[in-house]
Image: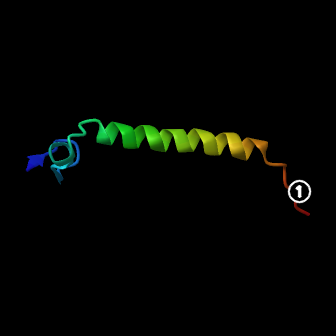
Amino acid sequence: MVRTSFSGLYSIWEREHNQPRYILDQLLSVINVSVLTVLIVKELPNLKFG
């Protein structure tokens, strides 16, 4: 097992699946979804209360 210094958790994902970019790809995926969500929300009409 490999102990990561960032989280302190044990992770062997890269060695088991031969994907050293797994964490980076997950982070980029979250960023992409966040940006797309902001774009969608900007296109929504304004709500008026009252």
Q: Which residue appears at 84% of the width and 49% of the height?
A: 45
Residue 31, how many percent across, how many down? 49, 39
Q: How many numbered circles does the render carry?
A: 1
Left or right for 23, reference 29: left
Left or right for 5, reference 27: left
Residue that lies at the very extreme toward the bottom in this rendered image: 50
Left or right for 26, reference 45: left
Q: 19 or 33, which lies in front?
A: 19
29 to 1, vertically: above or below: above
Left or right for 50, reference 14: right
Q: Which residue appears at 70% of the width and 44% of the height?
A: 40
Residue 18, how many percent across, how many down? 20, 40
Residue annotated with mark 1: 48
Residue that lies at the very extreme toward the front in this rendered image: 17
Residue 22, how many percent across, how many down? 30, 41
The colour scheme is rainbow
Local crowd at mark 1 within 10 Å, few (<14), some, or many (≥20)?
few
Q: Which residue appears at 47% of the width and 44% of the height?
A: 30
Q: In which quarter of the image is residue 35?
A: top right
Q: What's the amino acid at mark 1?
A: Lys
Q: In which quarter of the image is residue 47?
A: bottom right
13 to 50, vertically: above or below: above
Specify the quadrant that holds the C terminus: bottom right
Q: What element carries label 1?
A: loop
Residue that lies at the very extreme toward the left in this rendered image: 1
Q: 45 or 12, which lies in front?
A: 12
Q: Which residue appears at 25% of the width and 39% of the height?
A: 19
